[in-house]
Amino acid sequence: MKKILLILFSVCFVHLAVGQTQLNLPKNITKSGNRPQVVPGGRTCPGIISSTSHTDAKCPKMNDGSITILPAGLQYRIGTKNPNTFQPGNTFSNLTPGSYHIQVWDGGICYAGTTEVVGVQSTVTESLSKTDESCIGKKDGTITATGSGGTPPYEFKLGTAGTYGINNVFTNLKPATYRIFVKDAMGCGNTSVPVTILAATDSCPSIAKSGNAPQVVPGGRTCLGMISGKSHTDATCAKMNDGSITILPAGLRYRIGTMNPNTFQASNIFSNLTPGSYHIQVWDVGICYEGTREVVGVQSTVTVSLSKTNESCIGKKDGTITATGSGGTPPYQFKTGIRILLYPDNMFTNLKPGTYKISATDANGCGGSSSVTILAATDSCSHIIAKKTKLSLQTSDKQFDATLYPNPTGTQFTLRVHGVNNQPVTVRVTDANGRGVYATKGFAEQPFK
């Protein structure tokens, strides 16, 4: 009997050693010498982990993050780091940002798993401002970089081939696209954003004094910040020259580039301007100048809306057009076609078929126009004149008296048939030559067209 029991125990022991996977459990953990190793079999015991915590890395490329598992005193490993080796320390150091799966072993047959994420403490970012090239070929663009996030102070460099330094303003740049890189005191950097210096479209000659009239001569320097403000007054309408531009401060010298291009004026106001975009240069009477652009618009546009009646009968030439003005400054005057005279009357009559352009002008002389087409009639509109007002109508078995009115008539008349109550009749209308003009069926009394 004892021999049989020994055999059964041996069989059970062999079963554990072989570790068949009928239980569908993850890998068991057991001790092999001084280093715990992963072997088949085992049991999950979730409650052996009481808490987890981490410290984020300083920046995406730094490996100074860490993860701590509680309680201490067990065995720990990161699944993707030395996958078959556990450590007695419950803190994992020198970690880069990422997600980590950690297993904890109790030294027996229990283990548990958890996931912890190491993030980034603060990302270094930058904001960029620029000034484009001021004059054609001058290559005087600038880029100013400002760092944020991470750990100040910051260092900057222009392009991948540049050298980091504390200077954050890059000058004398020709038109092109540039990348500015920034890093903080911990060496953490950013992914740079491209910025483009645009090429100048103005030759911007220098400004110097020649006698009493400032003149344009070669050389010179752009001095930004001289212009403190600007404003404009729109022109009354598209063809009027009553717009204006004012530049601040006063007391300098001013010119519009396309107006007296070589002469500056002492006044900071430009008057008598038509609608358009104006490039203005300001001179300090030394070697500094600055340019700006201002747009003079239109205060209100005169518009014309039209209604019409087409020709009523072929050849009658009785079309009409009614015009209504809006915008600008009332009252309005109107004209048709290229006629010189304007009329306060907004209705045009006795118009033959055709397309007409109606123009309107407001109290300031500002105008607008619109077109409309008078359609030709398709009906001759022949008048009906009955030979008799009182008629006698004969049927196969009866004779009826009838009255037609009005007589003569245009396009509509009434035929009254006496002695017929709600019976259908047929009316045929002919012209003076006996040609049929209209035929219809109706009741004994109703108008016919």
Image (cartoon, helix red, strand yellow):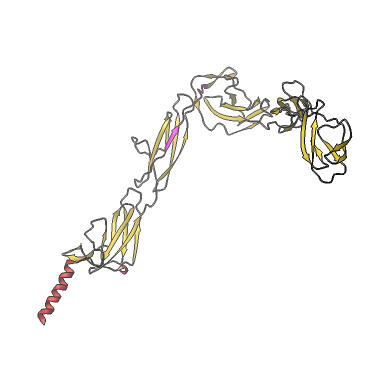
Spot occupied by residue 381 in the image (x, y as percentages of width and height): 78, 29
Residue 90 in view: no
Please name whichever residue, 27 or 278, is drawn nearer the observer in this view of the structure: 27
Whether 176 is drawn above or below 341: the answer is: below
> Is residue 446 rendered magenta in the image?
no
Q: Quadrant for the N terminus, please.
A: bottom left
When the figure is inspected, residue 189 is found, relative to residue 220, above or below; the finding is below
Coordinates of residue 360 in the picture (x, y in percent): 73, 28
Q: Quadrant of residue 9?
A: bottom left
Whether residue 65 sits left or right of residue 19 in the image: it is: right
Q: Residue at x 33, y 67 (%)?
A: 50
Compared with 35, 369 (above or below) is above
Which residue ends up furthest to the top in the rendered image? 211
**Toward which corner of the image does residue 126 lie, by quadrant?**
top left
Q: Check the image and name the residue furthest to the front.
A: 397
Quadrant position of residue 71: bottom left
- Relative placement, left or right, of 1 versus 317 is left
Q: Quadrant of the image for the C terminus? A: top right
Q: Main secondary structure of the magenta part?
A: loop
Closest to the observer, 441 or 358: 441
On whether residue 199 falls in the magenta region, the answer is yes
- Residue 364 lies, in percent from the top left, at 73, 28
Residue placed most toward the observer, 98 or 268: 98
Q: Position of residue 283 (x, y in %)?
A: 56, 26
Q: Is residue 288 visible?
A: yes
Q: Is residue 152 depicted above or below 215 in this figure?
A: below
Q: Which residues are magenta?
A: 191-206
- Left or right side of 38 for 53: right
